Each structure stands twice: as C-alpha cells, then as structure tokens.
C-alpha cells in the first residue's frame, strides 16, 4: 500500500514535501514536483516532513533538481534529514541536495 505524498505550497516559492515517496507513488510525486516547482522562482522545498529516505525518494529529488537545472531555475532543499543525506552521499549525489541547483 502506498503512503501518501504531498507537495504543499507554504509561501511564494516555498514548498513542503510531506509523507513518503515509494514505488507506488514515485511517478505521481515526480510529476507533481515538475508541475509545481517550475511555476515560480526561486524555489525551496522543505524536507523536514518527508518520511522516506531511500533510493526511490532520492531519485525523485534528483530528478526535480535536474529538471530545474535544464529549465535554468534555482531549486534548494532545506531541512535535509541525516538519513537522506547519508543515502545521497552513498549514491554520490549529495551536491544535488545541498547546493542551490541553477545558481
């Protein structure tokens, strides 16, 4: 069973990722991020309420970063949990999470 995932607007250019990203909802999370995150600039996504910290979650976040960079946009992640940071380090994609992409 898929956990719920939402990307909520919390202010102009500020979003909060909530819930979990898993195999059942990754495509929806990817599409939602691509749609919402390119609507304004600059963009920051607060990950404090993101419950998942695995390869699937990381793949979606890196895809958002890549999509933003190709569009010439700046995307920043805030409140990156230690577990997610460790997974990103393991996959050698930590720079996609800790730096503003598109700067």
Image (spheres, rainbow, N blue to C red):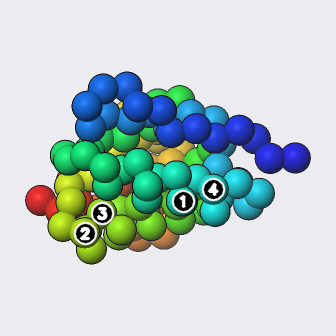
Precedes in sequence: disc 2 or disc 4: 4
Residue 9 horizontal/vertical position (percent): 41, 31
Q: Dot 4 surroundings within 10 Å: few (below 14), some, or many (20 or more)?
A: some
Residue 10 horizontal/vertical position (percent): 37, 25
Could you tell me if the residues under marks 3 and 1 are in contact, i.e. CB atoms within 8 Å? no
Q: Dot 3 surroundings within 10 Å: few (below 14), some, or many (20 or more)?
A: many
Precedes in sequence: disc 3 or disc 1: 1
Residue 78 in view here:
no
Q: Which residue is mark 3?
A: 68
Could you tell me if the residues under marks 3 and 4 are in contact, i.e. CB atoms within 8 Å? no
Query: Residue at left 12%, top 59%?
Result: 103
Q: Residue 86 or 64: which is nearer the viewer?
A: 64
Residue 16 horizontal/vertical position (percent): 44, 33
Q: Dot 2 surroundings within 10 Å: few (below 14), some, or many (20 or more)?
A: few
What's the CA distance linking mark 3 and mark 1? 12 Å
Precedes in sequence: disc 2 or disc 1: 1
What's the CA distance linking mark 3 and mark 4? 17 Å
Q: Which residue is mark 1?
A: 30
Residue 16 in view here:
yes
Precedes in sequence: disc 3 or disc 4: 4
Q: Is residue 90 left or right of residue 70?
A: right
Query: Residue at left 48%, top 69%?
Result: 91
Query: Residue at left 31%, top 34%?
Result: 14
What's the CA distance linking mark 1 and mark 4? 5 Å
Could you tell me if the residues under marks 2 and 3 are in contact, i.e. CB atoms within 8 Å? yes
Could you tell me if the residues under marks 1 and 4 are in contact, i.e. CB atoms within 8 Å? yes
Q: Which residue is mark 4?
A: 28
Q: Dot 1 surroundings within 10 Å: few (below 14), some, or many (20 or more)?
A: some
Instruction: Using the image, tell me which numbered label, if any, was put on residue 71.
Output: 2
What's the CA distance linking mark 2 and mark 3? 5 Å
């Amino acid at each position: 069973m898929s956990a719920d995932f939402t990307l909520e607007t919390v202010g102009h250019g500020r979003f909060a990722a909530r819930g979990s990203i898993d195999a059942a909802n990754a495509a929806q999370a990817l599409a939602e991020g691509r749609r919402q995150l390119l609507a304004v600039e600059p963009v920051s996504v607060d990950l404090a309420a993101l419950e998942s910290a695995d390869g699937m979650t990381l793949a979606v976040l890196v895809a958002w970063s890549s999509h933003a960079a190709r569009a010439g946009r700046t995307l920043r992640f805030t409140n990156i949990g230690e577990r997610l940071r460790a997974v990103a380090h393991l996959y050698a994609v930590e720079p996609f999470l800790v730096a503003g992409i598109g700067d």
